[in-house]
Amino acid sequence: MQHPPKALLLDMDGVLYHGEQVLPHALTFMHAVANIPHLFLSNNPIRPPEAIADRLQRMGFERPPTEHILTSAIATARHLAERKPGFRYYAIGAPGLDAALSRLGKAATEDVDFVVVGEGPGLDFDSLTLGINLILKQGAMLISTNPDASVDAYVDGEHRVLPGGGALVAPFEVATGRKAETIGKPQPLLYRMALDQLGCQPQDCIMIGDRVDTDVAGAQVLGIRTALVRTGRFAPGDPWPAGLARADWDVSGLDQLLALWRRKWPLGFDVDTGLQG
Ligand SMILES: [Mg+2]
């Protein structure tokens, strides 16, 4: 708690924006921390990093290099390639998932090493049937990009709750009796990859998110300091979920977080740390 962060990990939806709407103070905050190496982490496997970078730029943020955006789909592809170089996979999810996997693996409908289930359209009776047969008859491993039960979405400006990665992989688990290996937050893998990429020790890093169960809880497992901003899943005044450890900072928004950091580290936390960003 005593030293300013050398690097930041940032969730995006509910922290920087909601749908197409930039959240208050997000642009100011990102400008203030621009010199701190940071990565954007997303459990959402649907959009490729290029599309996310475009979106941030369109919203008025400085366009991040695509390597600074780590989605659960990118992390899944890297993890599977480490486990089995040139892996073969059958993917069920949005096209963005297949785009990430196909860079390091080969799509197939038989003799696959992994059945990968992600968010978005793609799951139907046929894909479920093929997936469970690949697992039960050919020994493929079941992989889930992210464990979210549900996700917030905005369709034509209207809020909708969509099934998350956890909900979509559940039928495969029930049908096969196998538990999926899960990649996204709060599993440690996405965080470990981020720390490795930044060349940063957990205690030197701060994760900023809007969800306690994924953003905060997952980072805490590795000893990463955490900040909950109540501009997404949690509104100011909402009770902290029972059984989950408190974040180091619990703030109404990014303006409050910035003010607290500047008070805590008056000599300036936003100096260039020299880490890989
Ligand atoms: Mg979020």
Image (cartoon, helix red, strand yellow):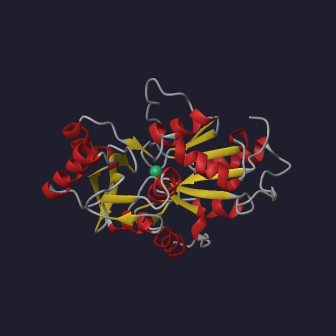
Compared to 193, does 102 lie above or below? below
Q: State the residue lying farthest toward the top.
A: 243
Nearer-the-camera pick, 232 or 102: 102
Who's the residue at 57% across and 46% down the image?
Answer: 191
Tell me the residue at 35%/46% (across/down): 141
Residue that protrudes farthest toward the left in the picture: 125
Which of the pair 167/229 is nearer the observer?
A: 167
Left or right position of 39 against 187: right
Residue at the image position 44 percent from the left and 43 percent from the top: 235
Query: Residue most toward the right?
Result: 267
Relative horizontal placement of residue 209, taking residue 29 as reference (left or right):
left
Viewer-closest of 217 and 155: 217
What is the x, y in percent for residue 83?
50, 50
Q: Residue 70 in the image: state x and y as whole percent.
A: 54, 58
Residue 2 occupies quadrant: top right
Q: Is residue 246 above or below residue 201?
A: above
Question: Residue 65 at what x, y percent from top left?
Answer: 61, 71
Residue 82's x, y, as percent? 53, 53
